[in-house]
Image (cartoon, rainbow, N blue to C red):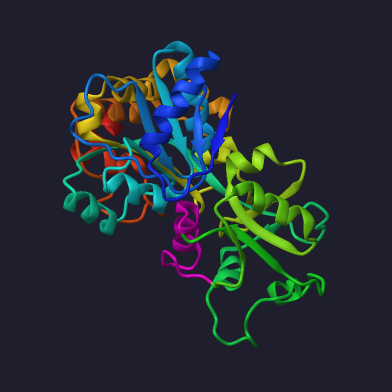
Amino acid sequence: MNLVIQLKNQSLRFFAIALLLIVSACGNNETITSTTEISPQVKEEDTEEREYVLVDGSSTIFPLSDTMAQKFMNDNPENQVIVGISGSGNGLKKFCIGDTDIANASRPIKKSEIDLCRANEIEFVEIPIAFDGLSIIVNRNNDWADCLTLEELTKIWQPNNDDKNKITNWKQIRDEFPEEPLSLFAPDADSGSYDYFTDAVTGEEGRSRKDYQASEDDDLIIQGIESDWGSLGFIGFTYYEKNQDFVKLIAIDNGKDQCVEASSETIANGTYSLLSRPLFLYVNKNSLETIPPVKAFIDYQIDVANKAVISEVGYVPLPGLLQGKVRERVEKLTTGSVFDGESAVGVKLIDKLFSEKERNKISGS
């Protein structure tokens, strides 16, 4: 039983307690998910007696968070994990005002969000949990496009106030394409996927044309692409894999006249470099120190024994070297972001997690 709760302007804490009683009465240990606004308060008085964990954020990470939560609760039936979906931006806002224990994010925390956390005296530990790639998708009946260049993606998505130059037809992208109206579908502006894509494709986070079908629900994006012959959009690779029978994947030219598709292999080996990215958990340091289920759930997710879960859900696990460094950060309660509010586009995670001296030692060994 996976309960999807739709809450507006209510306290998740109140509903969490009520729902935990319902779930306990039913004898089930499943994630309770919320797809709308949630507003609990993670206060310092939440100590050892608390038996639930509050998580919210990225829809991209939700399948992993949900799977981990269910497996964790199967092994720890005395605890409950409550997972919300509101997008990376909204999830981090809630986290930085003390509303949740953990924020799921498909991009690094921004400087404005770091400032918000600081203003509310929220210290956090940043945990890269896996790698993912953004997949460019079209309608499966599209028989003219198999690969697009970065320049073509930029031309499609860049903001343009001049309707004359706005790309509204496939033939405007490439002369050999047909006269087919172009419809665009993508995550909304609160999504970390949107932030990452616009940064990589238009050169500035949040900079894109606004006349596209936006949704925080990846399933609705898939449905839009599936129902529109001339559609194009982007979603996380995991969601593409789940829906590959309904949409078509487009490769990206790597600039060397080689077309590379998103796959677990190309994301892991770095050949799908333009739209590959790390995914993050941000955990409240106070919760990590004082609420045993929070510490237990984080330890569960970064345990080497559960690395296979990441692959099973469709993400790319961190290599052992990086995973070891992440565990070290958790054990030492290392706070702050290694990205310091900056973008992850074109940045290697190893360069952020390890000092130059450490990297030289690794490369020399």
Residue 234 lies in the magenta-colored region: no
Q: Where is residue 337 in the image (x, y as percent from the top left)?
A: 25, 45
Quarter assignment of residue 45: top left
Q: Relative to the observer, which residue lies in front, 247 or 345?
A: 247
- Residue drawn at the location 75% of the way across and 75% of the way down: 171
- Residue drawn at the location 37% of the way across and 51% of the way down: 344
- Residue drawn at the location 76% of the way across and 53% of the way down: 226
| Residue 134 falls left or right of residue 9 | right
Q: Relative to the observer, which residue lies in front, 236 or 124?
A: 124
Rendered position, 244 above or below 312: below
Q: Position of residue 72 (x, y in %)?
A: 44, 18
| Residue 283 falls left or right of residue 135 | left
Rendered position, 168 above or below 25: below
- Residue drawn at the location 40% of the way across and 24% of the way down: 301
Residue 204 lies in the magenta-colored region: yes
Work out whether residue 203 can be spotted.
Answer: yes
Work out whether residue 318 can be spotted.
Answer: no
Q: Position of residue 346 (x, y in %)?
A: 40, 53
Q: Where is residue 42 in the image (x, y as percent from the top left)?
A: 27, 37
Count numbered badges in the picture: 0
Q: Give the range drawn in magenta.
A: 190-208
Quarter assignment of residue 147: bottom right
Q: Relative to the observer, which residue lies in front, 135 or 110?
A: 110
